[in-house]
Image (tube, rainbow, N blue to C red):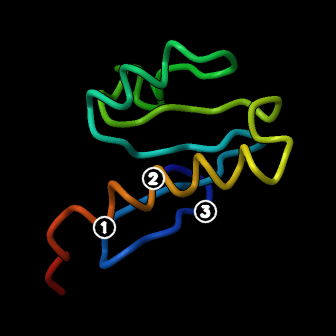
Amino acid sequence: MFGGIAFMLAGNMAVGVIGEDLMVRLDPADAEQALREPHTRPMDFTGKPMKKMVYVDPQRTASDEDLAAWVDAGADYAASLPPKQR
C-alpha cells in the first residue's frame, strides 16, 4: 500500500518500513505527542499528513531499546482496534 513493508495485528497495521524510516500507527493523541520528539515527522505519504501515523528517522531507532519502544507503541494501538473481517 505504501511502497514498503507493513506489520499487521488482526488485520490492522501497527508499523511499517519505507526506505530507512519506520512508520508507526498510533492513537491520534499519542501521535501528536510523538511528533514533539526529535527525529519524528508527520507521515504525509499522500501529500496530506495522516493524524494517526508518524515517520521515525533512523537516528531515533538506532538502539534496540528505541526500536522496540516504537514497535510496541504501534502494536499496542493496533491491538486495541477491532479485528478486520476477511
Residue topped by disc 2? 74
Q: Residue at x 27, y 27 (%)?
A: 29
Looking at numbered disc 1 in the image, what kind of residue is underneath it? Ala
SS for dot 3: strand
Q: Residue at x 80, y 35 (%)?
A: 58
Residue 20 rendering spot, x and y as whole percentages: 78, 41
Q: Residue at x 75, y 50 (%)?
A: 65
Residue 46 rendering spot, x and y as whole percentages: 40, 30
Residue 69 rendering spot, x and y as whole percentages: 61, 49
Looking at numbered disc 3 in the image, what kind of residue is underneath it? Ile
Numbered badge on residue 79: 1
Q: Residues within 10 Å of mark 3 (few under 14, many from 20)?
A: some
**Quadrant containing the N terminus in the rendered view:** bottom left
Q: Of residues 63 and 28, which is closer to you in this image? A: 63
Q: CA distance from mark 3 to mark 2?
A: 14 Å
SS for dot 1: helix
In the rendered view, would you say 22 is above or below 28? Answer: below
Q: Are marks 1 and 2 in contact (CB under 8 Å)?
A: no
Q: Residues within 10 Å of mark 1 (few under 14, many from 20)?
A: some
In the rendered view, would you say 10 is above or below 1? Answer: below
Name the side, left or right, on which 12 lies relative to 74.
left
